[in-house]
Amino acid sequence: MKRINILFVLFLVFFSATAQKAIIDKNNTNDYEFFGDKINFEKVVSSSYALKEFQKMNNKDTLELKFSGVVADVCKAKGCWMKLDLGNNKEAMVRFKEYSFFVPKDITGKEVIVSGVAFVKETSVKEQQHYALDAGASKEEIAKITKPKKIYSLTADGVLLKK
């Protein structure tokens, strides 16, 4: 009897995982707005999984990555970059391939899926201050930026914005 129960539980776990994947793969693209290249829902990982991948990387490493996340901040001037929450007080800085597209400036807190090349880089004080200015930070907040920072980054070729 125990074997049957174990097999039944394993079957349910497998079926649930398969059903969840099917829901994601068959998701209605009408629920999303596309920016840049059209991307699909295959092999999308969570932001927490993306954080683990970023943490394994060294300077100059690159990785093709497609993950979902919540927009923590966006450029208020043009929509030319956004920051995605990765959890554990970490963010990914997302810029857009060859500056070829932008996202809306009012998407903070919204869910997106990004696809592109992930990398880690050290960002200078001047560059951090520029982004803070774009984000609408005060002069006092900008003045507090005094050290270079290791940044998780992604150059996105496509973005899906959940409507």
Image: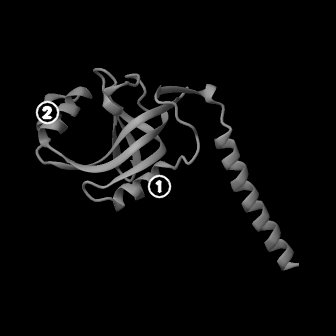
Q: Tell me if residue 163 comes above or below residue 149 in the rendering.
A: above
Q: Tell me if residue 44 comes above or below residue 8 in the rendering.
A: above
First of labels 1, 2 by sequence position: 1
Q: Position of residue 139 (x, y in %)?
A: 13, 29
Q: Give the structural element (helix, strand or loop) at label 1.
A: helix
Q: Quadrant of the C terminus?
A: top right
3D distance between C-alphas at marks 1 and 2: 34 Å
Q: Give the structural element (helix, strand or loop) at label 2.
A: helix
Q: Position of residue 27 (x, y in %)?
A: 66, 36
Judging depth in this view, the residue of 98 and 118 nearest the camera is: 98
Residue at horizontal 62%, vertical 29%? 29
Judging depth in this view, the residue of 1 and 139 nearest the camera is: 1
Residue at horizontal 54%, vertical 46%? 44
For label 2, the crowd category at 10 Å Cα-Cα, with few meaning under 14, some 14 to 19 and many 20 or more, is few
Q: Residue under circle 1?
A: 49
Residue at horizontal 38%, vertical 24%? 101
- Name the kind of residue labelled 1 in the image: Tyr
* Residue 158 seen in the figure: yes
